[in-house]
């Protein structure tokens, strides 16, 4: 029985992971469920999946979680705070960790799982963007197996399963809700428009990142760390059908691609079952039913400069990706609150990158300091723009 910790259990990826787990009661069990501050949603999941442990990150929610578990007659133990979560993922409470906490908040528990040698189903892209070198080294020394859950990286993982190195990888992007829009048209978009993704069901932050192409930029940095490739061997193509999730070129001229319907349960089933294939609940791809054609085009970097900013941060190395990530998180949050416009997001990120030259990313403390300073600078800029 594989015991699985689902971190970010109330989010879209956590919900998908629990759906796959529930399909395999003889081999998979959700032993730990963790959420940020949604006590009621976490309690509902506990009543359904009966985990051994439930963790709420916001310590103010501990009493409500504890009392709710008791009232439901569950034996699930209540915990609160990041230290409790880190201890659980590092101990024998689980064999596999689905790391789906959004943002930099997911880094400590992801590192704890890597150091403890767990099977790490990585959906928290910020862990690699903020501290890619540290995470890969922690996994190597701890004996952890990282299986990426982003559909693009999971596709590459599958294409590289025979062990041959890639000559080049191509990440595909749907283009988001604003594909084909000019920079002038983007000036007045609303948060509601930005989160209305045409293909994927995701949280608001990730949806905005997809709309700005920052999500693809972060994935480029992830791919660099996961597969050990420089920027020159990574490209991005817009593929509006979202059926080809990535392509891998090999030295002999062959190109392998992984295709499937846009449903995160496929990648999660790969991570939970690998090297076996297990049922995910996702139907097989019928290309004719999907329109019978596959289109690709170059991204519009003038209208969507976030992708260029991410490639530049990756090339600069050191603390630059951490600065990029922190500035973007703050800017996206401000946009979702209606404090700044959509085009202010890349402008803020670019300004903060210019203000913070990269330093060596040799320790987690250095990265967290860069993260904090970048957030402060971004917040100051946002305050100026908003006023």
Image: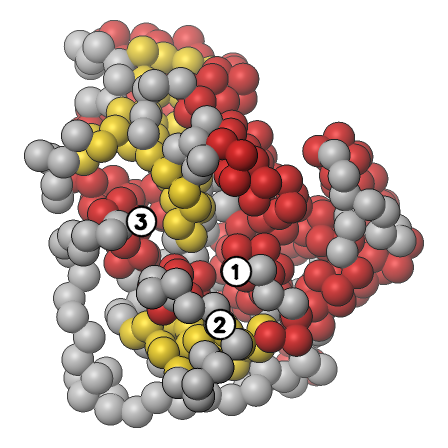
Q: Nearer the viewer, residue 124 or 198?
A: 124
Q: Residue at x 53, y 76 (%)?
A: 168
State how far apart marks 2 and 3 are (Cα): 21 Å
Q: Is residue 64 among what the camera can see?
A: no
* Secondary structure beneath label 3: helix
For label 1, the crowd category at 10 Å Cα-Cα, with few meaning under 14, some 14 to 19 and many 20 or more, is some
State how far apart marks 2 and 1 are (Cα): 8 Å
Q: Is residue 311 among what the camera can see?
A: yes
For marks 3 and 1 on the same chain, the one whose residue lies earlier in the sequence: 1
Instruction: Answer with left or right where residue 270 lies relative to residue 9.
Output: left
- Model colouring: secondary structure
Disc number for residue 227: 1
Q: Which residue is mark 2?
A: 166
Q: Position of residue 227 (x, y in %)?
A: 52, 60
State how far apart marks 3 and 1 are (Cα): 16 Å
Q: Position of residue 108 (x, y in %)?
A: 57, 30
Instruction: Answer with left or right where residue 232 lies relative to residue 79.
Output: right
Instruction: Answer with left or right where residue 239 lies relative to residue 211.
Output: left
In this rendering, is residue 271 above or below 108? below
For marks 2 and 3 on the same chain, the one whose residue lies earlier in the sequence: 2
Q: Which residue is mark 3?
A: 271
Q: Position of residue 71 (x, y in %)?
A: 23, 9
Q: Quadrant of the N terminus?
A: top left
In this rendering, is residue 182 above or below 121? below
Q: Position of residue 261 (x, y in %)?
A: 26, 70
């Amino acid at each position: 029985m594989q015991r699985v910790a689902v971190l970010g259990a109330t989010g879209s990826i956590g919900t998908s992971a629990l759906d796959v787990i529930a399909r395999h009661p003889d081999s998979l069990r959700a032993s730990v469920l963790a959420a940020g501050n949604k006590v009621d949603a976490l309690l509902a999941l506990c009543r359904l999946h009966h985990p051994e442990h439930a963790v709420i990150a916001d310590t103010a929610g501990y009493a409500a979680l504890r009392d709710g578990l008791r009232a439901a007659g569950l034996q699930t133990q209540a915990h609160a705070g990041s230290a409790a979560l880190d201890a659980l993922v590092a101990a024998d409470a689980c064999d596999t960790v689905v790391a789906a906490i959004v943002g930099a908040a997911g880094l400590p528990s992801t590192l704890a799982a890597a150091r403890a040698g767990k099977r790490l189903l990585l959906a928290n892209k910020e862990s690699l963007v903020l501290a890619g070198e540290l995470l890969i080294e922690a996994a190597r020394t701890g004996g952890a197996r990282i299986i990426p859950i982003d559909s693009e990286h999971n596709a590459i993982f599958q294409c590289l399963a025979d062990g041959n190195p890639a000559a080049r990888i191509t990440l595909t992007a749907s283009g988001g809700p604003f594909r084909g829009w000019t920079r002038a048209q983007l000036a007045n978009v609303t948060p509601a428009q930005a989160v209305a993704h045409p293909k994927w069901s995701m949280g608001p932050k990730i949806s905005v990142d997809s709309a700005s192409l920052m999500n693809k930029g972060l994935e480029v940095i992830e791919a660099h760390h996961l597969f050990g490739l420089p920027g020159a061997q990574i490209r991005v193509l817009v593929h509006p059908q979202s059926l080809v999730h990535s392509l891998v070129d090999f030295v002999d001229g062959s190109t392998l691609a992984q295709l499937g319907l846009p449903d995160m349960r496929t990648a999660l089933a790969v991570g939970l079952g690998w090297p076996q294939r297990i049922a995910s609940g996702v139907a097989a791809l019928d290309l004719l039913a999907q329109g019978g054609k596959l289109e690709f085009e170059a991204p519009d970097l003038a209208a969507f400069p976030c992708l260029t900013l991410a490639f530049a941060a990756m090339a600069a190395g050191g603390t630059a990706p951490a600065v990029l990530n922190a500035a973007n998180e703050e800017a996206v949050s401000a946009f979702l609150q209606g404090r700044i416009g959509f085009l202010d997001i890349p402008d803020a990120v670019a300004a903060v990158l210019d203000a913070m030259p990269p330093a060596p990313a040799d320790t987690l403390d250095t990265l967290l300091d860069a993260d904090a300073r970048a957030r402060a600078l971004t917040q100051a800029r946002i305050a100026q723009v908003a006023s």
